[in-house]
Image (tube, rainbow, N blue to C red):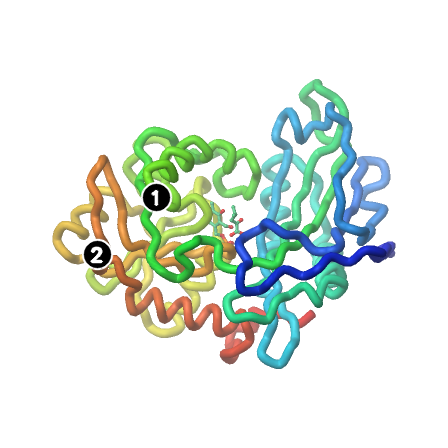
Amino acid sequence: MDIRIEKTTSPKVHPDPNTLGFGEVFTDHMFMMDYSKKEGWHDAKIVPYGDLVLSPAACVFHYGAEVFEGMKAYRTPDGDVQLFRPMENIRRLNNSAERLCLPQIDEDLALEVLTKFVEIEKDWVPAKKGTSLYLRPFLIATDAKLGLHAIDEAKYVIIASPVGSYYKEGINPVKIMIETEDVRAVRGGTGYAKCGGNYAASNRAAAKAEEKGFSQVLWLDGVERKYIEEVGAMNVMFKIDGKVKTPKLIGSVLPGITRKSCIDLMKSEGQDVEETFITVDEVIDALKAGKLEEAWGCGTAAVVSPIGLLSYEGVDYVINDGKIGELTQHLYDELTGIQWGEKEDKFGWTLKV
Ligand code: PLP
Ligand code: COI
């Protein structure tokens, strides 16, 4: 497909790489492409970053018909730019879209427009250690009709933001509260899809946790509130008595690409890893018995993030003396080593742009 390119005439000043937060500044351009039932995907363009003009009746505003992705472009030591497992994000975007009845995007086309966009914004990929260019593709329904109906019109947009670490703690352990009232997702719902509605449903518990000084909440299953699912913006892993356990993907948890990569890495190194049901009681019992050696979250934004404290029913439990564990540190080093091109990519996960 032809991609029309309109370069900005007023390039922005790049932010100081030493003070980058997460998702607060945006690059010079954005990618946009429209969908209609009649024409399919058309009018692909890279244009100056700016506001979207949509009808106030657009479906996305009323019924939450939106899915998104989160991925990063990394600057390697020799100055190249690379993506990490981009096809995984593209496939997940289509899986999410399928759940919400949004139109699919051909995988090759999705990769072509993504790499073209990153190429245009290449100078925005910061070089400082621990920084990257966060890419946020999203797909919204734009039909201007209030009746509930199948989607006829949509828009696919990609924006980009130079970022530092997601948590203010950086690689230092975060404090997480186990949520016992609200639930994020149920089997048969949209938990496995990366759609805005899941995050809207999470807001109340997250706000409550933040007020109490926690970084995020750990969700329990939506039926019995008994099984561990995931953290607000990351999947979760526990090392109990030498063995790593992570919640099984049963439809209510986001199938994280960082999760999958951590599992692949650990298995390749002979570490025992089990994708299974984990009860909250099992975790608390292991904590009390001194058998919970390490806990961490993993996600694109959060990378690999140690959990130093878990709070459950008003009691705070410290993990590994509130310090980063050996395996957590190892996973962080290996994964970021591959992503930033400092370590050999034995798995073929990276793609140069
Ligand atoms: N779980 C949730 C709810 C998330 O928002 C994310 C972030 O994308 C993840 C898990 C981790 O997924 P990934 O590793 O693909 O970024
Ligand atoms: C990501 O890690 O890419 C995410 O989507 C997390 C986001 C909700 C902040």
Q: Residue at x 78, y 58 (%)?
A: 11
106 to the left or right of 210: right
In the image, is residue 49 above or below residue 7?
above
Q: Residue at x 67, y 61 (%)?
A: 14
Mark 1 secondary-structure assignment: loop
In the image, is residue 312 above or below residue 323?
above
Residue furthest to the top in view is: 147
Q: Residue at x 81, y 55 (%)?
A: 10
- Disc 2: CA contacts within 10 A as few (<14), some (14-19) or many (>=20): many
The reply to whether the C-beta atoms of the residues labelled 2 and 1 are less than 8 Å apart is no
- Percent coordinates x, y for residue 2 in the rendering: 87, 56
- Percent coordinates x, y for residue 72 in the rendering: 59, 60
Nearest the camera: 309 or 155?
309
The kind of residue tagged 2 is Leu
- Disc 1: CA contacts within 10 A as few (<14), some (14-19) or many (>=20): some
The kind of residue tagged 1 is Phe
In the image, is residue 143 above or below residue 172?
above
Res 282 seen here? no
Quadrant the C terminus occupies: bottom right
Q: Residue at x 16, y 47 (%)?
A: 285
**What whole-number distance in Å separates the C-alpha atoms at marks 2 and 1?**
20 Å
Tell me the number on the disc at residue 214. Answer: 1
